[in-house]
Image (tube, grey):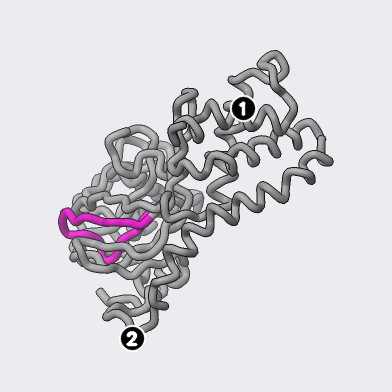
Amino acid sequence: MSDSTLSALSNIRTKVRRLTRNPSTSQLSNTDLDSYINNFILYDMPAHLKLDTLKKVLTFYTSPYEEEYKTNTTDADDPLYNFKNRYTNVMSPIYIAGEKATFSQSRDEFYSIFSMTETRISIGTGDGVTTNFTGTLSNIPVLQNHVIVSSKGSTEEKLVMVDDGEATFTGDVGAPSTINYIDGDYDVTFPALSPPGDGETVWINTIPYTPNKPNSVLFAENSFTLRPVPDGSYSVAVTVMQRPTEMDDAADLPELSEWWQYIAYGASIKILQDRLDMETVQLIMPEFKNQEILINRRKIVQNSGKRTATIFTSGYTYDSDFKGN
């Protein structure tokens, strides 16, 4: 009998039906059964096991003057498409343009090295009538999503508009207002009924930076932030753990054939828990754990010949040792 016959979805279904005592589709349809199986594969299994088989290198590319690269659900051709659902973990090493980059998942650690200090300058003074203010910043380029224009109205009310990362503003805006992050041109308009008051300063807050080849990465809130901000296009190769592939057709196979019994036991436990049959759950739990040990044994054997990494086994520094700008 071929391996594909042994480990296919059809065989997993049969095993689950035997463990849960549901031999007939009238008791548990294949549709419902597959839902339990895939629920375990996609969400429970990655939490139980971190397997090298699911580890891959994901490569995306930077754009000039863009610091942040986040998951999206609109462009299927983007390597980061649906990133937060397709991958469960991001880990070291990360390489930028072929060179190992420092990697952090702590905003406090990252921004203690790469500060986000705002520069505040006056771009005009209100007269109680004028709403539009234009000009060009001298300290450029400036970070997207960090431009703030503010003032006070004639009755001391606060007037604030902030950029949306797309070169336009939201907030107390009276007409389309824009900022060019690279050359510094700005054109902002407050509401006609709420112009800056007579003698009130109009301020603009920005975070200027010097673009360069990035060498440090922050991963937080499903987003990659690079420093220095890229001055061009560079490849970013990230080590990630991907979710296992769901199985829909009876002939579908798991990534590794040896997983099939583990998947069957895991799906069975979910079915029995929904039925509050905790006695049977306890009966099959030891074999579920045994299958988990057997799957992990491959990783243990694979890693048994590896030398323990120290500062003396490679020329790299620890990930927490950031390179400067």
Please state the extent of the stretch shown in magenta in the rendering.
Answer: 223-239
Relative to 174, does residue 88 appear above or below in the rendering?
Answer: below
- Residue 177 makes an appearance in the image: yes
Disc nearest the viewer among 1 and 2: 1
Residue 166 percent across, percent down from the top left: 30, 43
> What is the residue that sits farthest to the right in this orientation?
279
Q: What's the CA distance linking mark 1 and mark 2?
A: 52 Å
Query: How many numbered discs sit on the rendered protein?
Result: 2
151 is within the stretch colored magenta: no
Residue at disc 2, secondary structure: loop
**Residue visible at 40% across and 76% down?**
320
The residue lying toward the viewer, choosing from 303 and 80, is 303
> What is the residue that sits farthest to the top in this orientation?
26
> What is the residue that sits farthest to the front in this orientation?
1
Query: Residue beneath label 1, please?
Result: 14
Q: Residues within 10 Å of mark 1 (few under 14, many from 20)?
A: few
**Residue visible at 61% across and 27% down?**
14
The residue lying toward the viewer, choosing from 1 and 315, is 1
The residue lying toward the viewer, choosing from 81 and 163, is 81
**Residue visible at 57% across and 32% down?**
12
225 is within the stretch colored magenta: yes
The amino acid beneath tag 1 is Thr
Q: Quadrant of residue 36?
A: top right
The amino acid beneath tag 2 is Phe
Relative to 39, does residue 232 appear above or below in the rendering?
Answer: below
The residue lying toward the viewer, choosing from 53 and 125, is 53
Residue 223 percent across, percent down from the top left: 40, 52
**In the displayed structure image, the side of residue 280 where residue 23 appears, left or right:** left
Residue 316 percent across, percent down from the top left: 29, 78
**Residue visible at 34% across and 65% down?**
93
Query: Residue beneath label 2, please?
Result: 312
